[in-house]
Image (cartoon, rainbow, N blue to C red):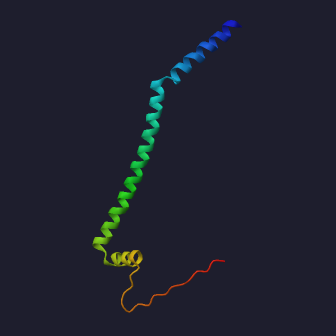
């Protein structure tokens, strides 16, 4: 019975020593940091693709440019009627 407990204690000590030493903890931290950085890179690539597409349309599509000016700067063309609707809170 005593040998049985000693084996578990030795096994637990070895596992604890291997898992919780400074090198392995540092390795796990680096893996989490790498995953986070990869997600940042993916997001940046997605944003870059959106901006490239927007630049392309701004340079090549005059209707897109007009729509962007109207939506972002609230510009209306001469002769157009602007309708504004008031929203009442209930």
On screen, 49 above or below 75?
above
Q: Position of residue 19 (x, y in %)?
A: 52, 24
Which residue is painted at 37% across and 62% down in the image? 50
Query: Splitting the image into 4 quarters, where does residue 49 fall?
Result: bottom left
Which corner quadrant holds the N terminus?
top right
Q: Residue furthest top?
A: 2
Q: Residue furthest front?
A: 89
Q: Residue furthest right?
A: 1
Which corner quadrant holds the C terminus?
bottom right
Which residue is painted at 49% across and 87% down in the image? 83
On screen, 7 above or below 51?
above
Which residue is painted at 35% across and 62% down in the image? 51
Query: Splitting the image into 4 quarters, where does residue 74 fall?
Result: bottom left
On screen, 48 above or below 69?
above
Which residue is painted at 45% across and 43% down in the image? 36
Query: Splitting the image into 4 quarters, where does residue 5 fall?
Result: top right
Q: Residue furthest bottom?
A: 79
Q: Position of residue 44 (x, y in %)?
A: 38, 53
Q: Position of residue 64 (x, y in %)?
A: 35, 75
Instruction: State left or right for residue 69 relative to residue 26.
Output: left
Total marks shown come to 0
In the foreground, 65 or 81: 81
């Amino acid at each position: 019975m005593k040998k049985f407990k000693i084996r578990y204690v030795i096994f637990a000590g070895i596992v604890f020593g291997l898992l919780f030493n400074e090198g392995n903890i540092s390795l796990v931290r680096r893996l989490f940091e790498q995953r986070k950085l990869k997600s940042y890179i993916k997001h940046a690539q997605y944003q870059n693709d959106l901006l490239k597409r927007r630049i392309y349309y701004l340079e090549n599509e005059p209707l897109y440019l007009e729509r962007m000016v109207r939506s972002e700067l609230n510009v209306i063309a001469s002769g157009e009627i602007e309708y504004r609707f008031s929203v009442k809170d209930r």
